[in-house]
Image (spheres, rainbow, N blue to C red):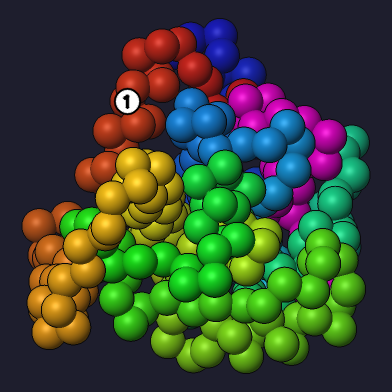
Amino acid sequence: MTSSSTASDTNRSNSGISDEEWKSRSRLAACYHIFDHLEWTETIYAHITLKIPNRDNQFLINPWGLRYDEVSASNLVAIDLEGNRRDPSAHPVNRAGYVIHGAIHAARPDLKCVMHTHTTAGMAVAAQQQGLLPISIMSTGYYGRIAYHDYEGPSLDRDEQERLVASLGTDKKVMILRNHGLVAAGSTIEEAFILMFRLQRACEIQIAAQAGGSPLNIPAVDVCEQSAERTDSFLNSNESPIGKLEFDSYVRLLEEQGKSFSP
């Protein structure tokens, strides 16, 4: 056993964290590092939240003030639906920034993980009146499957939560916050990740295609619908849980680079 793993086990045993929760913490910490690697961060802002196993309506969130590459399994903070800390922690929580996550977790218990980003491409598409265009293999996969929420300024007012949830609906898992950014959620962290990855790529492709100035080719409606259905089938195949292979590939990459997620 390495010294780092020994320290990790000591941190866990001293805090009374179960094996199952520690696995979730390590997985979420890895996700923050993946976001940092992909440059989906904006200093200390935005969040990825994950339901804590066997703890009613409690979630893990990044410590307010730390960069994504500073997040670890042990410094993630346990909070409730209101953003209040539920365990002792040396770190504060950005409760104001939890408005979006708290609303989705409360209304959609099927969505265990919620991700929100402020990437340049995502915010650029969010600023466009027509939203995400079905012009690529990535974007057609979202045809009829993406929600939009109108801009109300920075999401700091809890009064907005009801309207945000209404915009998301009961069946959507991805949403563009107009003039703001992107949201992706899933029943697992891996599902939320692959949905965000594909949405981010769709936005990047759209901005690149528009930059050329040539007319864009929009496939016929039936082609878009068929593409979305095929994408659903591909992502939900029985070969592996949705998003796991993609997520694990980045975990391996970062571990090979010497990154550690569970101290």
**Label 1 element class:** helix
The answer, for residue 61, to whether it is visible in the render is yes
Give coordinates of residue 234: x percent, y percent. Answer: 13, 64
Q: Left or right: where does residue 223 sit relative to residue 247? A: left
Pointer 1: residues within 10 angstroms few (<14), some, or many (20+)? few
Which of the 4 quarters of the picture holds residue 219?
A: bottom left
Q: Left or right: where does residue 49 sit relative to residue 217? A: right
Which of the 4 quarters of the picture holds residue 141?
A: bottom left
Question: Callout 1, which amino acid?
Answer: Arg
Residue situated in front as seen by the camera: 100 or 210: 210
**Residue 78 magenta-drawn?**
yes
Instruction: Point out the stretch of residues depicted in magenta.
Output: 60-82
Which of the 4 quarters of the picture holds residue 235?
A: bottom left
Residue situated in front as seen by the camera: 212 or 31: 212
Give coordinates of residue 169: x percent, y percent. Answer: 53, 89
Q: Which residue is mark 1?
A: 252
Secondary structure that dominates the magenta span: loop
Most distant residue in the front direction: 214
Residue at 74% over, 88% down: 162
* Whether residue 194 is situated above or below residue 247 in the rendered picture: below
The answer, for residue 83, to whether it is visible in the render is no
**Residue 164 magenta-drawn?**
no
Q: Left or right: where does residue 58 sit relative to residue 24? A: right
Which quadrant does the C terminus fall into? top right
Residue situated in front as seen by the camera: 184 or 1: 184
Residue at 49% over, 17% down: 259
Q: Left or right: where does residue 150 sit relative to residue 213? A: right
Residue at 67% over, 78% down: 150
Which quadrant does the N terminus fall into? top left
